[in-house]
Amino acid sequence: LLAAILRQQFPNARFTLIDISDEMLAKAHERFPDGDVRIIAADYSQEPIPGRFDAIVSALSIHHLTDEHKAALFHRIHEALNPGGAFINADEVKGPTPTMDKFYWDEWVREITARGVDPAEITGALERMSHDIPATLDANLAWLRDAGFADVDCYYKYSGFTVFGGVKSK
């Protein structure tokens, strides 16, 4: 979905999608049947990122990795970017304290309940999210800096959902 939105905004860009999930790869093939989007089955958390890119974007994926794997991935992303290239990650983060973390998730449940999401769907989402391994925003930003990124910042934050990233120096 993110690639489709970006493709509308940047119709002349070339896209490479990487995922380990057969289900997600099948959806990508359905969404981009014309073959002009490169789709790769790979485990980006373990394997080198195939190619050099001006931008690498991710959404709701990296929080599944351990902290060690997040930090290592940020290094591999930095290596795969061309000078001046940007990395943008839209993802969930853990609150900076247990109290804030609980507040974020209580707020999220309140918000989706108010929007009419079925209670069974909420229960299912909470069960899936119980396996997530989010880190704090501060930790993610520090790992980006450690990987060599410049201009590291959080561009958007709503409770535990953020958009953050950095740029590879020219």
Image: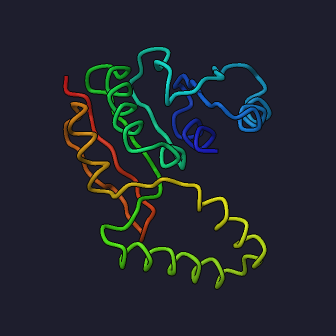
Asked where in the image residue 15 lies, by quadrant, the reply is top right
Q: Is residue 17 positioned above or below 108 on the image?
A: above
Q: Left or right? Give the position of 161 relative to 78.
A: right
In-front residue for pair 109/2 = 109
Residue 115 place in picture, x, y as percent: 66, 80
Residue 98 place in picture, x, y as percent: 36, 74
Kindly identify the residue that appears in the image at 25 percent across and 50 percent down. Answer: 153
Asked where in the image residue 83 lies, by quadrant, the reply is top left
Its colouring scheme is rainbow
Kindly identify the residue that appears in the image at 20 percent across and 42 percent down. Answer: 151
Kindly identify the residue that appears in the image at 64 percent across and 21 percent down. Answer: 40
Q: Residue furthest top?
A: 51
Q: Left or right? Give the position of 147 relative to 8.
A: left
Q: Is residue 76 positioned above or below 152 on the image?
A: above
Kindly identify the residue that appears in the image at 80 percent across and 33 percent down. Answer: 30
| Image quarter in which the C terminus is found | top left
Residue 54 place in picture, x, y as percent: 38, 24
Q: Total of numbered circles in the picture?
A: 0
| Image quarter in which the N terminus is found | top right
Q: Is residue 143 positioned above or below 120 on the image?
A: above
Q: Is residue 112 positioned above or below 40 on the image?
A: below
Q: Left or right? Give the position of 122 relative to 107.
A: right
Q: Left or right? Give the position of 56 relative to 130.
A: left
Residue 81 place in picture, x, y as percent: 35, 23
